Image (spheres, grey):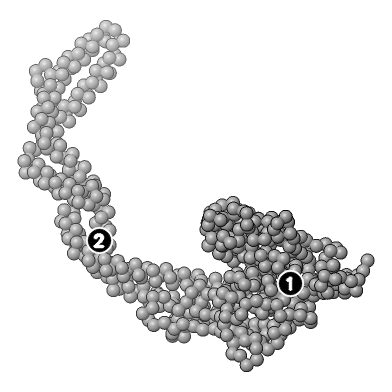
Amino acid sequence: MLKTLLIKDYALIENIEVEFGKGLNIITGETGAGKSILIDAMGLLLGERASTEVVRKGSEKSVVEGLFDVTGNKKVQQLLTVNEIEFNSELIIRREVSLKGTNRCFLNDTPVTLNLIKETGDLLVDLHGQHEHQSLLRAETHIEMLDEFANLEVKLNEFRSSSRQLSALSKELRDLVQKENLLKEKKDLIEFQIKEIDAVSPKEGEEEKLSDELKILENSEKLLSLTNDIYNAVYENEQSIQEQIADIKNKILDLSKIDKSFNDNLNEVDSILASLADISSFMRGYKDRIDIDPNRLEEIRERLGSLILLKKKYGGSLKSVFEHREKIGAEFELAENFSIKISQLEKKIDDSRKSCGLLAKKLSQERKVVSSKIKKEIEDALKYLGISDSIFKVKLENDIVPNTAENFIIVDGKNYKFNEHGFDNIEFFISTNVGEDPKPLVKVASGGEVSRIMLGLKSILAKTDKLPILIFDEIDTGVSGRIAQKVGQVLKSLASYHQIIAITHLPQIAGLSDFHYAVEKKKAVDRVVSSIRILKGEERIKEVAKLMSGEKVTEATLNGARELMGLSKN
């Protein structure tokens, strides 16, 4: 719902702020008072292109700002969230047009692009008149209107889920074919690298083990000399450490016979002798195992050299060599079996195209049924609104594509182009005069007739239409008398489901308003200024009476206005 509209320095408007309410908001005023300027400003707020000509004379910039209640509007919430704009129950849209040519756009005080303003406006308002926001005049919206009327949301979600799977499989196939071409070019290189790595055939942890062994072999003479020295010092030499400790033990033994306190030292000496025995045994065994083998030394050096070369070429470590070998092994296997994998994937895609096709066919069948129903209902609604000879037609077409097309679904054995709505192309056609063939609705002359056509359509779609605000300009063009009363009744009915803002010259429509506003033009100093105010009580009755009889209002016309508005005289 549009709660507040603020306009500053826009054309004849100096500064107005108007609050709109729920239900039917009617705007009236004399020709040239500024009603169309008000609608133009609303169009600017909703993303229409701006010109510096709208800036009021003597001002630097024009500002149009709208405060919307967007509680529960999931589409707006999603759009703002995707664009990282904070969402809450109220949304402020602001446009600024400067004489310097700058055009600034804001959502909740966050600078945004004009396209984002337009996207947001398209989710909030349907504006009918000489404006781009007329959803009926955008053929791409026709299928959405039909689907909302038919309540096809569940089936649409099923189709979209299936089509996303198809798209994912198609992308996988494209990537695979692209990879095949790349791998064909790389196959010789991959094969060479596999052979090079496999010729060395490195093992996990091998480099560390070989490095340790190399260190031992390169120092074998020193190891032999030192271990032999240690063994001799501990066990073999005259006055060896073992003999000296054994002599110490005997002396402590003699001392313990005199003083038992030496017994503790005997245990420690025994421990030392045991440790010396272990050391001498290890040294003897180690030196006996030392094999000074020049051939083995050279073999290890060559092996380590081969591993170092692999590391330099394939990532700097054996781990990276193993990872590269695994990767190119998988690529080589894929290159060898591309035809099998592509065939398997093509079978999955074919099955997916058929399952998508079945879901799309069900959608299409339901649309055909609903098209017949909506045709009659809209023709009846238009007849009620004074377009008695109208023919309304829902044109449903499908595009057959060849097998060479990149994306298609299969329906009854034929290939069809598809999008998120299925494989149907929907467009509304209409004829409003006897003898004329129905033509695309988007080509029908705009103005009151289009507004009444939209009004008729909206009266059928009211409960399912997701746009919360409908603005009607020129709703009463070519309408008078009995039809005007019916137009008003349809607007009043629509106001149960939407916030309606409508400009009218007809008392039959104005008399049914929930909120009535008057646009007035006054001379201030040396210039003309447009303003708007809400009418209440007798002012409202008088305004309806003026619409009935002109500027001269009599008691009779006031009574007629009261009767028209369903009010009794106080």
How many residues crowd around disc 2 within 10 Å: few (fewer than 14), some, or many (20 or more)? some
Q: Earlier in the sequence, mark 1 or mark 2?
A: 2
Comparing labels 1 and 2, the label whose residue is closer to the camera: 1
Q: Amino acid at mark 2?
A: Gly
Q: Amino acid at mark 1?
A: Thr
Report how far apart the C-alphas of labels 1 and 2 lie in the structure: 77 Å
User: Is 494 above or below relative to 209?
Assistant: below
Quarter of the figure that contains the C terminus: bottom right
Determine which residue is flagged by label 2.
Answer: 329
Determine which residue is flagged by label 1.
Answer: 504
Splitting the image into 4 quarters, where does residue 532 fall?
Answer: bottom right
User: Is 103 above or below relative to 507?
Assistant: above
Mark yes or no: residue 566 visible.
Answer: no
Mark yes or no: residue 138 visible.
Answer: yes
> Which of the two residues, 564 or 421, is positioned nearer the viewer here?
564
Q: Secondary structure at mark 2?
A: helix
Give the numbered dot on residue 173.
none
> Which of the two residues, 321 or 222, is positioned nearer the viewer here?
321
In the image, what residue occupies the spot 22% across and 66% down? 185
Quarter of the figure that contains the N terminus: bottom right
Q: Of all residues shown, which one is farthest toward the front?
A: 526
Residue 16 x, y percent position in the rendering:
70, 57
User: Is 285 above or below relative to 345?
Assistant: above
Residue 506 x, y percent position in the rendering:
77, 74
Q: Is residue 547 left or right of residue 114?
A: right
Residue 444 x, y percent position in the rendering:
60, 81
> Which of the two residues, 414 or 542, is positioned nearer the viewer here?
542
Q: Is residue 413 left or right of residue 173?
A: right
